[in-house]
Amino acid sequence: MSDFENEFDDASGFDDYAAEFSSDLDLCAHALRNVHAFLHGELSEEEADMIRRHLSACERCIDNFRVEEQITKLIQRCCEVHASDTLRVRVRALITSNI
């Protein structure tokens, strides 16, 4: 279960948000277009809340979101590579010798 799934029982504001779209598919497309920005915390709090509400109500979108969330977590884990002490010393030496 995703971190946000139990956060929003209150649907206040969601009807206004949903009214901006002509169909449920438009609402889904909007949520999916913004999934990466949502996952990386790049949306305003209001927009993130609306995406959370949509995802908690839309099985199709939450399934897609979970896949993207897992991919993002895997990428973040893979990018946690740390340079060795030897490499850091060499890079610092190169930087200071060129200053």
Image (cartoon, rainbow, N blue to C red):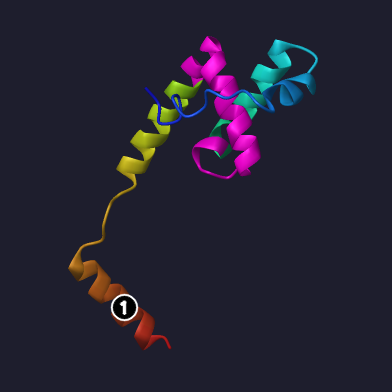
Q: Where are the magenta residues, as a range? A: 38-64
Residue 68 among those drawn in magenta: no
Q: Secondary structure at mark 1?
A: helix
Name the spot of residue 8 as percent of width and height, x first.
52, 27
Residue closer to the observer: 4 or 60? 4
Residue at horizontal 79%, vertical 23%? 20
The correct choice, above or below, for 89 with respect to 7 in the image is: below
Name the spot of residue 30 as percent of width and height, x first.
68, 25
Residue at horizontal 37%, vertical 38%? 75
Residue at horizontal 37%, vertical 35%? 73
Residue closer to the observer: 48 or 80? 48
Q: Amino acid at mark 1?
A: Arg
Across the whole image, how many numbered discs are drawn on residues? 1
Using a 10 Å C-alpha cutoff, classify the residue at mark 1 as few (fewer than 14 neighbours), some (14 to 19) or many (20 or more).
few
Question: Magenta region's main secondary structure?
Answer: helix
Which image quadrant for residue 17?
top right
Residue 47 among those drawn in magenta: yes
Residue at horizontal 56%, vertical 13%? 58
Name the spot of residue 80 as percent of width and height, x first.
30, 49
The correct choice, above or below, for 53 with respect to 98 in the image is: above
State which quarter of the image contains the C terminus. Answer: bottom left
Left or right: where 94 falls relative to 6: left
Q: Which residue is mark 1?
A: 92
The correct choice, above or below, for 25 with respect to 6 in the image is: above
Left or right: where 33 falls relative to 66: right
Name the spot of residue 18 as percent of width and height, x first.
73, 20
State which quarter of the image contains the N terminus. Answer: top left
